[in-house]
Amino acid sequence: MDNVFERSKARYLVGWVVLSFVLSFFVPDFKYSTNLLLLIILYFIPLWWFNSKLKKDGQSLRHFFPKPFPIKKTTLMASVVMTLVFAVGMLLLVIAAILFLFPEAENMILPSQPKEVSLGFFIFNMINLVIIAPVCEEIIFRGFVLGRLTYKFGVNKGIIFSSFIFGVMHFTNVFGAAMFGIILCILYIKSNSLITTIIVHAFYNAVVACGDIYSFIDEGNYSGNLSAPPLYPTMIVALLCTIIALLWIVPFLKKNWQPAPLVYENQVIEQ
């Protein structure tokens, strides 16, 4: 088989994205120019690279956007809600682990207010979070990385490896993002279209963005500092969130873990 997944190496694209992500920590925040530059480096250059590979194969990015096979709306909604609950549980478990290993962290003082941002910059970030990021990340991770790793290792390992990379890229909650990546991979394969995963990803990010919207609207109403949360309440909430989410995630994975293989240009992409 001679196609883009055979000729292209995922490590080049992933390496570029990881490097760009690391560089983002050294770029000043709250400036249009620097954040626009990050978008170009982190998303648009990898997309240009992938699209150029597709053109050599006589294809384009449109290949990944056919009319999706139908999936129940309840499944799509649960994919958003339950993976978000799982992500919250994983994040709180990490916090609980830190508090358990370092008890003095409970007395740590945290700043209560983020840096003040303008309305225009806030809107810019919301557009990035809800529109740009879902589209670009789905093309990169479900479109290319999953396809390449599936071609090389098979569909099951392709799902796991690509989701792990996706999780690492969202380092603030690796486990939650990796699980979300697994769910998105399955939804992509079942629907045979990135349209489905972009919609789910966008809704997921929109829910996350609600917290930022609340903070922006409520800015200035809080004063002083906040202490780190206490250990045992944090652990209890973390376990509850994780268990509730797994009650849906585990049956979903057991039912769908053997999805149909990826199809590219009417060819099966599975070794």
Image (cartoon, rainbow, N blue to C red):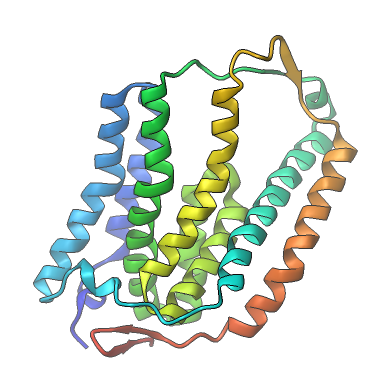
Give the percent coordinates (x, y) of residue 45.
21, 48
Give the percent coordinates (x, y) of residue 183.
55, 68
Residue 164, visible in the rendered structure: yes
Location of the C terminus by quadrant is bottom left
Residue 29, visible in the rendered structure: no
Q: Nearer the viewer, residue 67 or 141?
A: 67
Which residue occupies the extreme right position in the image?
232
Give the percent coordinates (x, y) of residue 170.
50, 47
The reply, left or right, for residue 4 in relation to residue 117 is left
Report the residue at 56% width, 72% height from top. Answer: 73
Give the percent coordinates (x, y) of residue 240.
83, 54
Query: On screen, 66 above or below 12?
Result: below
Query: On screen, 81 above or below 225?
Result: below
The reply, left or right, for residue 82 in relation to residue 196 is right
Report the residue at 72% width, 14% height from top. Answer: 225
The reply, left or right, for residue 202 in relation to residue 226 is left
Report the residue at 51% width, 78% height from top. Answer: 71
